[in-house]
Amino acid sequence: MIDFSKIKSVLDLACGQGVFERQLDSKTIYLGVDISKSFIEEAKSKQKSLNHQFAVGHVSKSLPIKKNDFDLAIIILALQNIENINGVIENASKYLKTGGKFLMVLNHPMFRIPRQTSWGMDEKNKAQYRRIDRYMSELNIPISTNPGQMEKSEMTWSFHHPLSKYSESLWQNGFLIERIEEWVSDKKSTGGKARMENRSREEIPMFMTIVAIKK
C-alpha cells in the first residue's frame, strides 16, 4: 500500500513503544508521538537511529511538532482507543505535506466492535457466521483490562464509529481516500469444525487499512 523507498519522513501517531520505528530505514526522518510517558521512555531505550525521535503528546490535541511536511503519517491499531478521531485526523493533515499520505490501521469497524459483534454457529447449515448487533450508532464502550478481577479491574475505552464517519472526517480535513484493504485473520483451526471455522475467517475480515492522500 505504501512504497517506503519513496518515503523520507514519517509521523507515527500513538506510536506506543516504537515498534514501527524499528522497522524503518535508519536514514528516514521519524517522529513518534504517544500520550504515555512510559511508552515513550521504552521507545527511546530501543531507538534505532538518531534520525528517529520520540515525544510525549496527545495525538488529538496540539502537538509539540515544528515540521509540517512529513511524507507519511500513520496510526496503527490505536485510533479506536481515542475519543476525538477528528482531532487525530486534523493533526495528520496539519503535519503532512500536500500529496502526503495518511495510513490508518483499524480493527474492522463493522465486524469487530467490542460487545456488539460475535461468532455464532449455524449447526443446521454447518456454518460459522459473524453476528452484528449494532453498527451505525457511535458507541463509547468500556473494556475491562483484567476481566477476572471484575469490578476491581481497571477500565479502558473503545470508541466505535461506522466507516462513513472516518470517510467524513478525512474529507473534512482535506484528504481523499486512495485505497482500502480488509485483512482476515491468519489463525487456523484444527479438529472437527476446522473447515467451517477456517472458511468463515477467510470470508470475514478482522482488520481494515485506509490510505488517504492530503489534497
Image (spheres, helix red, strand yellow):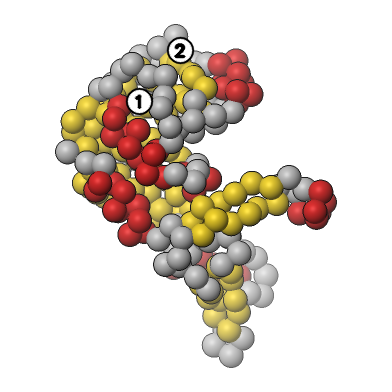
Relative to 95, is 139 on the left or the right?
right
In this view, the residue farthest toward the top is: 50
Up the image or down, 84 lies above or below 5; here it is below
**Looking at the figure, which quarter contains the C terminus?**
top left
Q: Is residue 181 visible?
A: no
Q: Percent x, y for residue 115?
A: 60, 64
Residue 68 location, quadrant: top left
**Residue denoted by label 2:** 49
Q: Percent x, y for residue 86?
A: 37, 44
Return the mark for residue 10.
Answer: 1
Task: Label 1, secondary structure: give it.
Answer: strand
Residue depicted at x 41% and y 27%: 62
Residue depicted at x 18% and y 33%: 99
The front one of 176 and 1 is: 176
Q: Percent x, y for residue 11?
A: 37, 27
Q: Are marks 2 and 1 in contact (CB under 8 Å)?
A: no
Mark before the other along the chain sequence, 2 or 1:
1
Relative to 133, is 69 on the left or the right?
left
Q: Amino acid at mark 1?
A: Val
**Looking at the figure, which quarter contains the N terminus?**
top left
